[in-house]
Image (cartoon, rainbow, N blue to C red):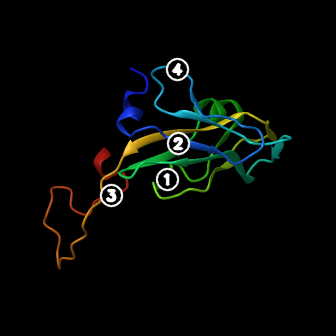
Amino acid sequence: MSGEILAEADNLIVEFTGNTKLFPNYATSSAAGADLKADLTSPVFLKPGDRCLIPTGISVAIPAGWEGQVRPRSGLSINKGVTLLNSPGTIDSDYRGELKVILINLGREVVSIEPGERIAQLVIGRIATANFELVKELPPSNRGAAGFGSTGK
């Protein structure tokens, strides 16, 4: 069953761009995201509130009609207080550069990101594009313009 989703998108072609040759992999047969790893030769230290761009050492060729989403790893968040600054990060099918991950330390202590450490997850999914149509007024709805917590009342 693992791989059926990816099989629908064809094979995801991966090129090594870094030195460590860390291939993305699914931790379990039911995992939605493949782990991306830090392509580092030495640890990177993040002070509380600091952010940094961590290379993964790979580029991917996502098929047309699909996208990649780079998402946080729950273990990194709970154990180190580190998450992704732009989450999810979108990888368009026409992007061919190295995948890099913007990490931020939201914790209270300095943390280290170790070479080869799993830092994010890559989720592949179908996309839909829309044709935008300009109108003078939107059709009404029950909710209207109520936002920011309005449905919790």
The residue at the point 32 percent across, 58 percent down is 147
The picture places residue 134, in percent across and down from the top left corner, at 22, 76
Give how far apart the Cα atoms at labels 1 and 4 are: 23 Å
Instruction: Tell me which numbered mark, 2 or 3, is placed earlier along the sequence.
Output: 2
Spatial separation of the CA atoms under disc 2 and disc 4: 20 Å
Would residue 59 appear left or right of 8 to someone viewing this image?
right
Q: Nearer the viewer, residue 32 or 76?
A: 32
Between label 2 and label 1, give the one nearer the viewer. Answer: 2
Label 4 to label 3: alpha-carbon separation = 38 Å
Dot 3 amino acid type: Gly
Q: Which residue is mark 3?
A: 147
* Three-letter code, disc 2: Ile
How many neighbours does mark 1 have within 10 angstroms: few (below 14), some (14-19), or many (20 or more)? some
The residue tagged with tag 3: helix, strand or loop?
Answer: loop
46, 63: nearer the viewer: 63
Query: Which residue does the image show at 67% across and 48% down from the upper left?
Result: 103
Q: Are marks 1 and 3 in contact (CB under 8 Å)?
A: no
For marks 1 and 4 on the same chain, the one whose residue lies earlier in the sequence: 4
User: Label 4 neighbourhood size at 10 Å, few (<14), some (14-19), many (20+)?
Assistant: few
